[in-house]
Amino acid sequence: MPHPIVSTLLAWYAHHGRDLPWRHTRDAYAVWLSEVILQQTRVSQGMDYWHRFMQQWPTVEALAAATEDEVLRQWQGLGYYSRARHLLTAARQVKERGAFPHTAEQLRQLKGVGPYTAAAVASFAFGQDVVAMDGNVLRVVSRLFDIDTPIDTAKGQHEIHQLAQQLLPTGRSADYNAALMDFGANMCAPTPRCNRCPLAAQCLANANGTAQQRPVKSKRSKPKEQHLLYIYMVWQGKYTALRRRPAGDIWQGLWEPLCIEEGKVGRGERR
């Protein structure tokens, strides 16, 4: 029998879980694509991108045959463009292999696939009994067990992973992972709804009055600002001076106007 926390969680999910298209398939490509798109992206924003990618490249083989420029163009607006490049590289790796790997360990061999994405695909597409730990899962478990170890440390993530893995009901990893994610997104959100939570009586953070302080995060340094000055140049009304950003930053490979950055002037290229 599942742990009482899990039984309550799955019952809540049966009535309140999000109806997402990639949850209606075991196609590893569709599942993997959704996970890559939703990294650092809200579901409401990522949904349209997922549909467009699936329409243009319905299989991993079709995506593998695309050019980098085609993929980057379709990715436009999502940001973190390294994800798009890794997506294309991984698609070509899968094509060379002949199929998607079936386990989290093997999936991590694909370009850009980290622990969370590997576990999510292994669980949702192949039914492997592994926990997929995203930010929602970290938050829910840290509150349920009132964990004060920072979740952005290896120790904190290991502690939470061990607890979440112990609760996982054999053979139901997909429902369990989806339930934890949706519960964290809708009920145990950054501002928790403890007065409406079906797990309130079993939550240690709620009992100890620390729900607002969980999860704990380490202090981070202030992000460094970067200032760019762009000069838009057009010749004869037909040619625009552009350059392709070199390797070394998150925008590498993207086209941009003449740029003055940190005292250095980029050289334009006609396109």
Image: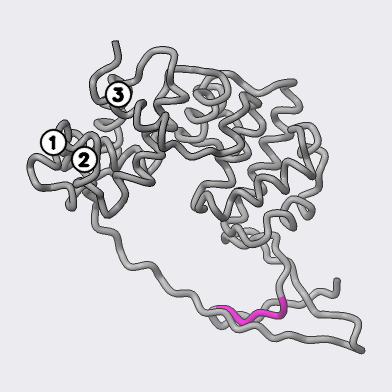
Q: Earlier in the sequence, mark 1 or mark 2?
A: 2
Query: At 62% from the left edge and 62% from the top edge, which residue is drawn?
Result: 251
Q: Nearer the viewer, residue 249 or 114?
A: 114
Q: Which residue is mark 2?
A: 143
Residue receiving disc 3: 6
The boundaries of the magenta stretch are 257-261
Residue ranking furthest to the front: 15
Q: Main secondary structure of the magenta part?
A: strand
Q: Amino acid at mark 3?
A: Val
Amino acid on which the number 1 mark rests in the picture: Leu
Q: Amino acid at mark 2?
A: Arg
Direction from residue 4 to residue 269 in the image, left or right: right
Q: Marks 3 and 1: which is nearer the front?
A: 3
| Percent of width and height locating residue 7 | 30, 22
Q: Residue at coordinates 36% horizontally, 16% vertically from top-left?
A: 169
Residue 58: x %, y % from top left: 77, 36
Q: Are marks 1 and 2 in contact (CB under 8 Å)?
A: yes
Relative to 262, say whether 215 is above or below.
above
Mark 3 or mark 2: whose residue is earlier in sequence? 3
Q: Is residue 202 above or below residue 185?
A: above
Going by the image, does 235 lie left or right of 268?
right
Quarter of the picture containing the N terminus is top left
